[in-house]
Image (tube, helix red, strand yellow):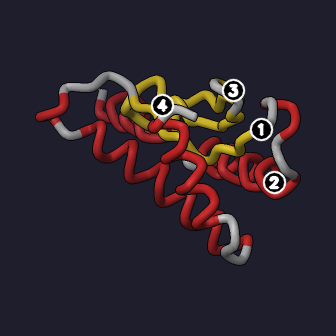
């Protein structure tokens, strides 16, 4: 197992024992933090990637029921909060993982509000 994927697996193994509500909150905080860190001007990033979880010895179609539930929760919350993202399930080196790709570092909701404000000012 690669060092990078080992880190993903170890991280998931540490938190998956949390009660599901706490786990959902933890993963949402992880996503928001990754998004905010990428927005820092000093980083000059146009997008961001956040790995949610990883399970060894599985394919992306074999992730555990818990993993699939929290993936669904995170996806729903990110959509609700207006993030421009895609959620990917993939596998590498015998490790299946889920990651969020923030395609842009602006929220759709914020863009809609900005447009609405500018049209009211005209």
Q: Which mark is residue 102?
A: 4
Tell which of 4 and 21 is nearer to you.
4
Residue occupying the point 80% across, 36% down: 58
Which residue is the site of mark 2? Answer: 69
Which residue is the site of mark 3? Answer: 91
* Element type at mark 1: loop
The image position of residue 110, as x and y in percent, is: 42, 40
Q: Tell us which disc is closer to us: 3 or 4.
A: 3
Separation of marks 2 and 3 at Cα, in angstroms: 18 Å
Separation of marks 2 and 1 at Cα, in angstroms: 19 Å
Lower sequence index among marks 1 and 4: 1
**Left or right: where 2 falls relative to 21:** left
Separation of marks 4 and 2 at Cα, in angstroms: 20 Å
Lower sequence index among marks 3 and 4: 3
Image quadrant containing the C terminus: top left
Separation of marks 1 and 3 at Cα, in angstroms: 10 Å
Residue occupying the point 63% across, 60% down: 13
Image quadrant containing the N terminus: top right
Lower sequence index among marks 4 and 2: 2
Q: Tell us which disc is closer to us: 2 or 3.
A: 3
């Amino acid at each position: 197992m690669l060092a990078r994927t080992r880190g993903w697996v170890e991280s998931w193994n540490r938190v998956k024992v949390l009660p599901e509500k706490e786990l959902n909150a933890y993963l949402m905080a992880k996503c928001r933090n990754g998004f905010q860190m990428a927005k820092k001007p000093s980083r000059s990033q146009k997008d961001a990637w956040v790995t949610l979880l990883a399970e060894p010895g599985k394919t992306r179609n074999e992730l555990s029921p818990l993993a699939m539930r929290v993936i669904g929760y995170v996806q729903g919350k990110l959509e609700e909060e207006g993030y421009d993202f895609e959620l990917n399930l993939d596998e590498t080196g015998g490790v299946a993982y889920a990651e969020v790709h923030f395609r842009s570092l602006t929220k759709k909701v914020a863009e809609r509000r900005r447009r609405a404000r500018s049209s009211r000012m005209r």
